[in-house]
Amino acid sequence: MYTAPEPIRQANERWLTRILERLGVTRQSAEGLSLPDLWRSPNLLLTQTCGYPLMTLLRGQVRVVGRPRYELPDSNGGNHCSLLLSRADDPRRTLPAFHNSRGVINDEGSNSGMNLLRHRLAPLHRDGQFFTSVGISGAHRESLRWLREDRADLAAIDSVTFAYLARHAEAEVAGLRVVARSAFSPTLPYITAASASDEQIEALRRVMNETLRELPDVAEILGLQEVLPATQSDYQVVLDYQQEAEALGYGRLR
């Protein structure tokens, strides 16, 4: 799910290439497949998804291989969070002050962009509403652009994405400020096809970790220490956050 900036894409490609070499398999083209089609493909060996679709759209239709343990600002121990950002020159300094502001999310099915933001704002809504408008940008980097261009006032950005941009594309986060942080959530899971056995999953995760150790420069660029064992049940907290927001009368981000 992390394909930018360019040093991150290249590092991921090197890691994936080495994994495939060790497994003795070839990479098939995913051209023409939507993300849901890719995730649910019976031929899926390895990809990454978001915790929210894992527990909603994909529940019971894929198996979790593991979750990455990043050691980055606001991301460690197999968890990450969302950073709630505004422009640095915005006079509002606290989250309640952004009531009736313009929000932007990357996607309605995003855990970091929508679900964690909804959970963080749930105690602050008034009659089910916090924002005057909520735009959908299509990507975290586009949400950042909306902030920089004064098309929105507040966005929730995955802390891994933010750390990568701060390291390798500083201009994309320049002039922005962290207003608040969300609750922690498990990092984005690596998944494989539903038909995979426990033994196949363990072997795949072992190769992922062995190749990561063989490529220390890749591990350094990605800020990735290891792939931890994980199951779908580890991501129940994602739905717990949804239910907590609903219990506070804020089931829909608006």
Image (tube, helix red, strand yellow):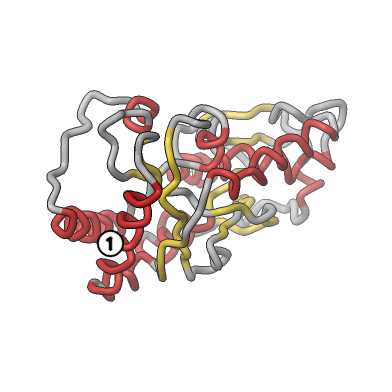
Going 27% across and 25% down the picture, which residue do you hit? 33
- What percent of the width, then of the height, locates residue 22? 17, 60
**Along the viewing direction, whichever of 120 and 134 lies nearer the viewer:** 120
| Of residues 40 and 10, the one drawn nearer to the viewer in this rendering | 40
Q: Which residue in the structure is indicated by mark 1? A: 207
Find numbered disc 1 in the image and state the secondary structure of the residue it sits on.
helix
Q: Residues within 10 Å of mark 1 (few under 14, many from 20)?
A: some
Residue at image location 51% in from the left, 37% down from the top: 54
Q: Position of residue 235 (x, y in %)?
A: 59, 46
In this view, 242 is above or below 198: above
Residue 209 occupies which quadrant of the picture? bottom left
Left or right: 105, with 25 as reference point:
right
Q: Quadrant of the C terminus?
A: top right
- Residue 237 vs 242, above or below: the answer is below
The one of 209 and 177 positioned closer to us in this rendering: 209
Q: Is residue 194 left or right of residue 100?
A: left
Taking depth in this image into account, of 28 and 99 the one nearest to the observer is 28
Residue at 71% x, 36% y: name it.
Answer: 242
Q: Position of residue 184 (x, y in %)?
A: 65, 56
Quadrant in the picture for residue 150: top right
Q: Is residue 196 left or right of residue 211?
A: right
Q: Which amino acid, mark 1?
A: Val
Who's the residue at 64% across and 38% down the image?
A: 115
The x, y position of residue 79, in whole percent, is 57, 59
